[in-house]
Image (cartoon, rainbow, N blue to C red):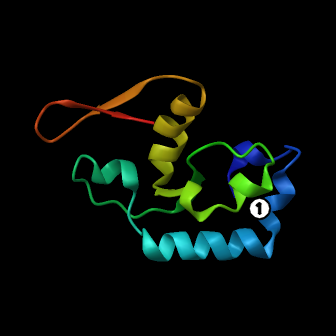
């Protein structure tokens, strides 16, 4: 469970069978962190994240195309900055910046 959702109006959605199924499916099909792979860093994903914040929208919440697998570090740092509206770039293996989000 992501601590940022605690206390939110839609916190209960993460306790549903739908979320458990979506999460299990996402991690099975994308077991590595999407952001880490951009820099060829193989890291196990443990967090299933909504690419676009659902803010309680069942359509966005349950859309499997709106999900991505991230490691906890990327979720708690890079993705949080993206969610706050920041432009985030990481340095690729070729030395060039890669904008994410």
Label 1 neighbourhood size at 10 Å, few (<14), some (14-19), many (20+)? some
54 vs 36, nearest the viewer: 54
Q: Position of residue 85 (x, y in %)?
A: 56, 24
Residue drawn at x 86%, y 44% is 7
Where residue 54 sits: x, y (%)? 71, 46
Write down the residue under mark 1: 14
Residue at figure coordinates x 56%, y 35% from the top left: 80
| Quarter the C terminus occupies | top left
Q: Is residue 43 left or right of residue 45?
A: left
Element type at mark 1: helix
Where, by quadrant of the figure, is residue 13 drawn? bottom right
Where residue 65 appears, x then y in whole percent?
Answer: 55, 60
Judged left or right of residue 23, residue 8 is right
Residue 42 is drawn in which quadrant?
bottom left
Direction from residue 39 to residue 18 in the image, left or right: right
- Which is nearer the eye, 63 or 21? 63
């Amino acid at each position: 469970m992501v601590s940022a959702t605690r206390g939110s109006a839609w916190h209960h959605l993460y306790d549903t069978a739908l979320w458990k199924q979506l999460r299990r499916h996402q991690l099975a099909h994308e077991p590595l962190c999407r952001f880490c792979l951009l820099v060829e860093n193989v890291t196990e994903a443990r967090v299933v994240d909504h690419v676009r914040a659902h803010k309680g929208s069942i359509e966005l919440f349950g859309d499997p195309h709106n999900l991505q697998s991230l490691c906890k570090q990327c979720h708690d740092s890079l993705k949080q900055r993206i969610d706050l509206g920041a432009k985030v770039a990481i340095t690729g293996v070729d030395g060039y910046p890669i904008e994410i989000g």
